[in-house]
Image (tube, rainbow, N blue to C red):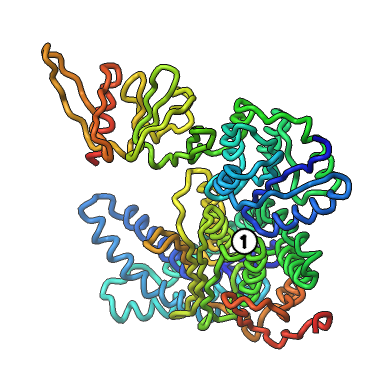
Amino acid sequence: MQSIIRQNGHKPALPDFRNVGTILRILIAVNAGAMLYALAREPSPGRLFAEWTAATAAVEPYLFLVLATLWATSPRLARMPLRTAESTVVLITVIAGIVAFQTNRLFLPVVQGSVLLWLVWGVIACILLLAYFELRTRALSPAIVEARLQALQARIRPHFLFNSINAVLSLVRSDASRAEIALQDMADLFRVLMRDNRDLAPLGDELELCRQYLELEQLRLGDRLTVDWNLKSMPADALVPPLVLQPLLENAVYHGIEPSSEPGTVSVNVFLSRGEVHAILKNPYRAEGGRHHSGNKMALGNVRERLALHFDAEASLTSRVTKEGYEVHIRIPYRTAGPDASSDRRQNDAAPVPERARRNANGASRRVPSADMNALVPNPNHA
Amino acid sequence: MPDSPLRVLLVDDEAPARRRLRDLLDDCATALPITIVGEAQHGREALDLLQSAQADLVLTDIHMPDMDGIELARHLLKLSHPPVVIFTTAFHEHAVQAFEVNAIDYLMKPVRVQRLLGALQKVPRLKPVTIERLSQLPSTARRFLSVTERSRVVLVPLDDIVYLKAELKYITIRTALREYLLEESLTKLETEFGMRFVRVHRNCLVARDFIRGFERRVNDDGDSHWEVLLNGVPESLPVSRRQQFVVRDVGRETAA
């Protein structure tokens, strides 16, 4: 379970109890519940705060105990059928409730009610929250489909497709082998664009896609486009939403390079820092008329939305204009497929490994290090 | 005329696109005598080339840096023998509609050799499109104004213009360095460039970026009026009574 929403199919599933967003939602809900409880017992504003403090003080250790247990058992729960997993969560709540009640009696002098009442409250809260998360998952699943469709529309401008075909045509007579490579790059690019992109995919693949895309742009734009890759500390095995970087690079070229006849540099810097994958993309900023900006906002909004669907509050996308140009910064939690990677994800991802064999001797574009470097088989046609 | 080859200028910011057109024109050469008089990367370069070279046809891309194809076509009309313009475009849905409506010739990229040949054979019968039809095309505001001086087309970058003043038949363009005479309508310029200029008088548009401030002047018979002070030029310009609100509005912006 790599994302807060299960990727394959539309079956509702438990939320990821290790996701900050999930934990935050539980904390807020329970404390709001405690506030309601206090309000019911003591409506006068003077005493309300004291009552609420007392209620939360009693509830909080219980809550943390449950959250800690769920954190620990999250991978196991994810593998169970939904109803079994939900029953297990309720059972955890009951056991943790008994433990917390006994501990509270030791440390807090005034503990009201019986252990039974205490457990009833805990189980009610637990069931309500489970119901909420299930509803939320159901509500979001069509949103993922929707996001995919949106992504299809927002990605790859037709302008790029036709200009690229035109550029390849210009090569056919003079440099047939370069035309071949360009067509292969285009095929790979469009294969990814047209497949089902709901599942997370390795970052190495995404960067390879970006490289192929930028090679095609370089074919059209020649010296006007320089790409500065900085991928030395990139975790190629990190799982990211497919097409998370490519649309942003397309923007960088469209807004930063194409409007000017002066050469410009697009820089791509991807690195791992404190358990998070960071990607910083920079391009020259051209203060153009309002014409381009709506398109830019659409692509940013699209990527931001997909990040939120996959990672909730743990991922972010920010953009700003600096002295050097326009900068987009993406932050994604570092997750890998791990040994127990679900097998169906692999199947969806069965697109052939892009051909990395021959590259033109362009110093600026470096080969992208990838998780599966053993796929580096030179193409026999060009050998 | 039938024997002299068709003189063609290619304009596209992408080198492969120019090479492709060159290849296709070579293919057409068996059916029709053609000479390629030059290649340019954008509109401004094309205009420079056409100051010295003559062309019957300009094949130009639309989406280009510095000066797009549509603006180029507008400036080309200032030449003493304006060439015919055919646009080449990869994908511009709206533009294509506008082309159809205004009967302006265009070719879709990738261009087929038969289509190109068909277009080339029509050229001797075609007349340059009119300003009116060109201005129907969805284009951004021009980046230059063009004036004809001693049968040469001179481009005045919009960024250099301090003010535009209507005088009799002409408009005077004032830059920090000198003045130019332009045959256009002040109202149309005001609409085209919108926020860039502010009208201070019935006959005068001033570039916001050059406004230094306003000054109240009292003349001999005790009447007072506002004058706008400008960066880059020594003279100041009167603000008419009807446009006095400008003093407040622009004054607030410059203060902020």
State the residue in front, A34 or A193. Answer: A193
Residue A241 vs residue B17, the one in the foreground: B17
- Please name whichever residue, A188 or A98, is drawn nearer the observer in this view of the structure: A188
Q: Is residue B61 above or below residue A56?
A: above
Where, quadrant-wise, is the N terminus of chain B in this rendering?
top right
- In the image, taking residue B79 as reference, residue B120 lies left or right, namely right
Name the residue at the right extreme.
B31
The answer to whether residue A211 shows anywhere in this view is yes
In which quadrant of the rendered view does residue B250 lie?
A: top left
Q: Is residue A136 left or right of residue B232?
A: right
Q: Nearer the viewer, residue A164 or A369?
A: A164
Q: Residue at x 11, y 14 (%)?
A: B220
Using the image, name the chain to which the residue with label 1 belongs: A
Q: Which residue is mark 1?
A: A221
| In the image, residue B250 above or below residue A17 | above
- Residue B222 percent across, percent down from the top left: 11, 13
Percent across and percent down for residue B175 are 35, 37
Q: Residues within 10 Å of mark 1 (few under 14, many from 20)?
A: many
